[in-house]
Structure formats: structure tokens, C-alpha cells
Image (spheres, rainbow, N blue to C red):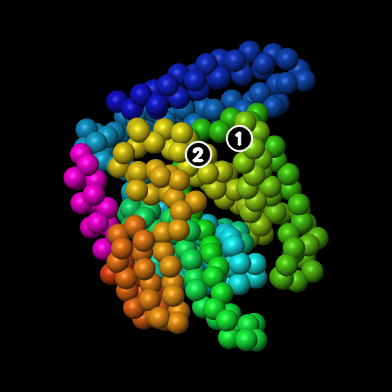
Amino acid sequence: MDDYRLTLLSELEKKIEETKSLLNEPEMSELATQELTELEKQKNDLEKSINNSSPVEESDDSIDYRNVILQVSGAAGGDEAKLWGEELLRMYARFSEKEGFKVEAIDEGVIKISGKNIFGKLKFEAGVHRVQRIPTTEKRGRIHTSTATISILPELEDIDLHISPDEIEFEAFRAGGHGGQNVNKVSTAVRIKHIPSGIVVTCSMERSQVQNREIAMELLRAKLWEQKIEKQQSEYASLKSTQVGRGMRAEKIRTYNFPQDRLTDHRINTSWHNLPSILEGNLEEIIKTMHESQTESVSQET
């Protein structure tokens, strides 16, 4: 049985008993009732998860089968880095759609990709992607080097990684950008800060504050999971080749050299050509080669 889930179940039962003791206090009874409803739901979901577990499921790496939260951040290179990040986001969205996965925008530079085994497919894509090309704004024809960082995170449920309500600060604000006058009249966008870690996430894509809050909590759980894995690398050997296993966000994993029409993956010292096709989402061969190489590497080390 999963020790973490049993520990979480015990913590939830203690929290339920503590909350019940507040029901008799007039000033706290309403809040306590709401909290109790949420805690009981979490307990029921967790008990179902435990009861439905089979030996096969427990031995599988279920993280590979999770949906993905993909985040792109422009790094070195100013405006060109931002443009490069947008192109990479479009590339992965195109690839996912071609594979039959569902792609949804969560926030600026962040998308959610839903489908079976999508985290398993994309987990080796995380890291720093470098581009070498002549920007459209370059007057003298000089080649510039810019970078963007890709984070690949699994979508987690509350039973996977529980966040206590007293650990977060919630703020609603008015969404900016396009969409007409009504967009800015109501505070539907949300910002959530996780107090213990200092992680801050935002979401403003949906018209409903409730929906934005749910999405922001998904993103926060994913980021906390990433942080947890970084601290416990030795317990997650199967993921050590991803960004959470080797600090890949700080590493240059690929270079896209436009003058030579070549993409090179520095981890396996392999190159591919036809960058226009690759940027249209034709990543099947690249992803397959990466998986074969990483699987072989893990087998040799074990």
C-alpha cells in the first residue's frame, strides 16, 4: 500500500476531528462546516483511491500517464527570446494536436495537454532550448543566440498532493488584455501564493473566478511536485533524466541552428534537419529517439 496515501488519510482524519470541535463555536461554525464538507470529500476520494489500487497499479509509474502542464519562459535574448518561447509553445501544441491530445491555454506561456501517457511522451523535452538565427529586426544580418526554458509538469489531484487552505494566500484581480470592456470590469483572474514555498501562480484565461482558481491550484500542485522531486532525486530514479531529476531547467538541452537548418540534442549528441517541419510539430522521430536513448541509459545504470 502507498505509505504516503495512508499518512495523508491519517492527517485528514485528525483535521476532521479538529474541525468538528469548532462547530460549537458561534463565530467559527459556518467556516468549520464548509471546511468539514471539503475535508470529508477529500477523505472519501482518498479512500476510493486506496481501495481501488491493485498490485499492478502500484508497481506502474502512473505519473507517465498524467496530463501535462507545459510552461514556456523566454530566457536570455530579450524580445527575441520571448518570440522564440512563443514558437516553441506553438510547436508543442501542434505536436499534441496531431497526436490526438487536447490542448487548452491556462495562462500566458502555459498550456495544459490532456491525453493518455502524454507526460511520458514529453518529460524529456524539459530544459533550455537555444536558438541561433537572424532575427527579423536585425538590420545587419547578424546571427543572434537566444534561449527559452520549457517546464513539463504532471497534472495532479488533491489526493496526490494535498495543499492545506491555511498555506495559501488568494487574491482576485481584473484580467487585462483583449476581450472587450467586460473583461476588465470583474475580478475573475486569480493569484495564489503558497506561503511555505513562496511559489506564486496566476490564471486569467477563464471568465469564471472559480474555474481560474481550480486551474491555478492545479498549476501550484504541479510546481510543488517538481520542487519535492528536486529534493528527493534518489527516490525517483525513473525520472532522473527529466528536468526534475538533474536540474534540467538550468541546462542547455537543444540548439536550433537556423543557418545550418539543424536541431541538435546535446544530451545524446544527435542532430536532425528541416527546422520548418519540426517547428510545425513534427517531433515524432525526435521524441522516439530520446525515449530509446534514455531508456537504454537507465537500463545500463540499473
Residue 23 shown left or right of residue 162 in the figure: right
At x 73%, y 44%, the residue is: 171
Q: From the image, which quarter does the N terminus lie in?
A: top left
Residue 154 appears in the figure: no
Vertical placement of 15 versus 183: above or below?
A: above
- Vertical relation: 301 (above or below) 116: above
Pointer 1 residue: 197
Q: Is residue 89 magenta?
A: no
Quadrant hosting residue 244: top left
Q: Nearer the viewer, residue 103 or 235?
A: 235
- Residue 66's disc number: none
Magenta highlight range: 287-302
Q: Is residue 250 above or below residue 277?
A: above
* Percent position of residue 73, x then y: 57, 59
Can you tell which mark lies on residue 227? 2
Front residue (pair 270, 211): 270
- At horizontal 64% and vertical 44% (from top left) the residue drawn is 200
The residue located at (22%, 33%) in the rendering is 55
- Residue 286: x and y in percent read 31, 67
Measure the alpha-carbon separation of dots 1 and 2.
9 Å
**Residue type (three-letter) at the residue carrying disc 2:** Gln
Secondary structure of the residue carrying numbered label 1: loop
CB atoms at circles 1 and 2 under 8 Å apart? yes
Using a 10 Å C-alpha cutoff, classify the residue at mark 2 as few (fewer than 14 neighbours), some (14 to 19) or many (20 or more).
Answer: some
Q: Secondary structure at mark 2?
A: helix
Say what amino acid the circle numbered 1 marks: Ser
